[in-house]
Image (cartoon, rainbow, N blue to C red):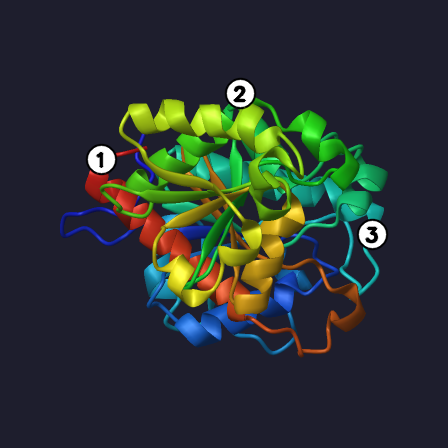
């Protein structure tokens, strides 16, 4: 099934951008993205035109194929009517189902070959639970469900660094139990495959962090590195994967160290996210690896406290669009879905 821009003379397929929570900063970010990119990175917004900022030039479209022409005069919008108005900072339960339906529609469009990728604006999980009984922890799990995938991986990426946390939104006390050989191996394999397919790296270089300080210091500060992490890495190294580690996380993220690998595999949330948010707080992109289509998202939330003020920073959203376009093009070159 086609999922990337054409490598022939045909125009590249546009990116489907979901509106996210309409009472957050998503609507104003969509306008900022269009003003910054125009038709350089063709994308259309899936959402309710009535939720967009007053005065923003809009180009309503009936089909994604109209995106490039429409982008020359306004933000291309594929209308999806919602049940209620959007009040900045105050999510309405009546709009929850609309948010969910827009995500599903974007996935359908990319899987049917009418869009090249999906870029999602932030959602508010509590609003979706309260208004529509949303049964998923977040975007990533819902997208995996829509794609029929059992295992996907979260990557945070910027120009200077790519990081993948093996365990994500769990308490630090629960990490040693959740961190199994199967989970670590699956995460590494999905990351390795995605770096080839989506980022165009022929032989990806991976650096794997240890769990404990100083990577356990030979067992003096924990045995997870000896008993679990190292055997997995050796098995994958024997298959020919370029993997180093387990390394001490406190020496992995300075500039000289980063030059030696293409992605860092980290054992838990903060071990991965602190370095990337320190290096590029505004420009980080959330990427879901292991899906049959490209999905990116800005690395921030709905920011209800500033919604509607026009002060949101579009840097991460613009980076997410550009990364989606680049990844979709890489898939097309590789003939991958």
Residue pushed farthest left?
Answer: 9
Where residue 14 appears, x then y in whole percent?
Answer: 37, 53
Residue 103 image position (x, y, % from top left): 58, 41
Q: What residue is at 51 percent from the left and 22 percent from the top?
A: 148
* Whether residue 59 is visible: no
Q: Nearer the viewer, mark 2 or mark 3?
A: 2
Q: Where 202 falls versus 321 (above or below)? A: above
Per the rendering, the mark at residue 18 is: none
Across and down, in percent, residue 136 comes to 70, 32
Residue topped by disc 1: 335
Q: Earlier in the sequence, mark 3 or mark 1?
A: 3
Mark 1: secondary structure: loop
Binning the other alpha carbons within 10 Å of mark 3 as few (below 14), some (14 to 19) or many (20 upward) gives some
Q: Which residue is mark 2?
A: 182
Quadrant where the N terminus is found in the figure: top left
**Quarter holding residue 54:** bottom right
Estimate the x, y position of residue 169 in percent, counting from the top left. Answer: 70, 40
Residues under labels 3 and 1: Cα distance? 42 Å
Say left or right for 66 vs 47.
left
> SS at mark 2?
helix
Q: Residue at x 49, y 32 (%)?
A: 187
Q: Quadrant of residue 273?
A: bottom right
How far separated are the C-alphas under marks 2 and 1?
A: 29 Å
The residue labelled by disc 3 is: 92
Reading the chain from its start, which is encountered first: label 2 or label 1? 2
Residue 139 lies left or right of residue 316; in this view the side is right
Judging depth in this view, the residue of 126 and 299 nearest the camera is: 299
Q: Is residue 101 left or right of residue 160?
A: right
């Amino acid at each position: 099934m086609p999922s990337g821009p054409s490598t022939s003379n045909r125009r590249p397929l546009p990116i489907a951008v979901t509106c996210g929570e309409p009472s957050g900063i998503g609507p104003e970010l969509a306008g900022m993205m269009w003003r910054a990119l125009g038709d350089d990175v063709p994308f259309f917004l899936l959402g309710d035109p009535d939720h967009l900022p007053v005065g923003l030039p809009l180009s309503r479209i009936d089909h994604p194929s109209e995106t490039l022409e429409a982008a020359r005069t306004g933000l291309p919008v594929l209308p999806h009517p919602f049940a209620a108005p959007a009040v900045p900072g105050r999510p309405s339960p009546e709009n929850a189902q609309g948010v969910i339906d827009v995500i599903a529609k974007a996935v359908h469009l990319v899987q049917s070959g009418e869009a090249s990728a999906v870029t999602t604006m932030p959602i508010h999980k509590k609003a979706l639970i309260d208004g529509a009984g949303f049964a998923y922890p977040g975007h990533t799990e819902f997208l995996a469900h829509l794609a029929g995938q059992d295992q996907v991986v979260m990557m945070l990426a910027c120009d200077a660094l790519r990081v993948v946390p093996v365990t994500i939104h769990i308490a630090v006390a629960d990490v040693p139990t959740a961190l199994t050989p199967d989970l670590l191996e699956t995460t590494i394999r999905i990351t390795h495959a995605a770096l080839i397919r989506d980022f165009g790296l022929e032989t990806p270089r991976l650096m794997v962090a240890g769990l404990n300080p100083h990577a356990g210091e030979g067992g003096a500060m924990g045995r997870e590195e000896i008993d679990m992490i190292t055997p997995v890495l050796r098995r994958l190294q024997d298959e020919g994967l370029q993997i180093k580690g387990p390394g001490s996380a406190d020496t992995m993220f300075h500039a000289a160290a980063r030059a030696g690998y293409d992605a860092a595999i980290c054992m838990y949330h903060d071990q991965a996210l602190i370095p990337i948010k320190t290096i590029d707080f505004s420009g980080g992109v959330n990427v879901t690896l292991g899906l049959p289509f490209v999905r990116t998202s800005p690395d921030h939330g709905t920011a209800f406290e500033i919604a509607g003020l026009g002060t949101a920073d579009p840097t991460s959203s613009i980076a997410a669009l550009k990364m989606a376009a680049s990844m979709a093009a890489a898939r097309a070159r590789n003939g991958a879905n």
